[in-house]
Amino acid sequence: MYRERASQVEGVVVWTRTAPEHDDGPVYPVLPDGCMDLLWIGGRLSVAGPDTHAFTPDLSDGGPVADAMGVRFAPGIAPALLGVPAHELRDRRVDLTDLWPGPEGRDTAERVATAADPAAALESAALRRMALAGPPDPLLRAVVGGLDAGRTVASVAETVGLGTRRLHRRSLDAFGYGPKTLARVLRLQRALALVRASVPFAETAVLAGCADQAHLARETRDLTGLTLGAYAALANSETPQPSGSSTTA
């Protein structure tokens, strides 16, 4: 069962997923959403970087499916508190101690492991780092807002006072990829939300900002590996999962 709640800080969500006692069902992919997650799964504290394609957990060892929990950061928030550019974590899952090799990483993992409420401990660790990093850059928020509204990269660059090349460099550090890719991912998420709400595909394409249904179908296939029909069937059978949640349905 999947649950989430808003954190004390805007743009941060705390989520938990409890694995069924007997779970031999299919493994569902985690789809790109522009976010990054701090994860606690099976006794491992790790970071899920921004994805450019669907991520399917590797359960080939046949081990039991573990409960999972995490703190999900909206696009552009996590790199400052992690101390690493987002593009270095693109399409990767990395142990937190590899990013924080000193006492902080070990102490954080120990606090989460021994906490009565690991999700709350995970949130506290993230909020402490955010307090040190300072508030999120309002320029990055404006970039995400503009692209999520369907505006062009050139228009967003002009609004925030950056040339397109500078915007691209800033985007690599903040989001893990350039603004055009971020725009595609955000558009995909708008479309998938409409599909989950049972909006017809042709109408979904127009509302999400695609040229037509064929365009939406190509984008869905390219970014998720699923057809529109397959995603709709998945949405009807499984609660959508957060970025980086390596669990089965």
Image (cartoon, rainbow, N blue to C red):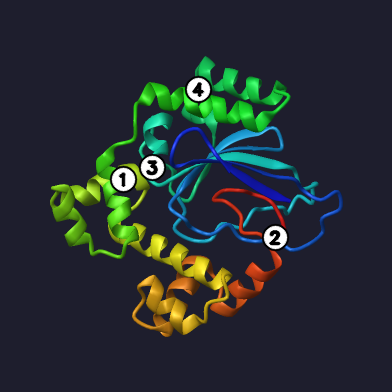
Secondary element at image label 2: loop
Crowd around label 4: few <14 · some 14–19 · many ≥20 (10 Å):
few
Residue that badge 2 annotates: 27
Q: Residue 56: name its quadrant.
A: bottom right
Query: Which x, y percent locates residue 197?
Result: 56, 70
Q: CA distance from mark 4 to mark 3?
A: 18 Å
Query: Which x, y percent locates residue 104?
Result: 52, 18
* 4 vs 1, front mark: 1
Which is nearer the N-term, disc 4 or disc 2?
2
Residue that badge 4 annotates: 101
Crowd around label 3: few <14 · some 14–19 · many ≥20 (10 Å):
many
| Quadrant location of the C terminus in the rendered image | bottom right
Secondary element at image label 3: helix
Q: Residue 196: name its quadrant.
A: bottom right
The kind of residue tagged 4 is: Pro
Secondary element at image label 1: helix
Marker disc for residue 141: 1
Q: Are marks 4 and 2 in contact (CB under 8 Å)?
A: no
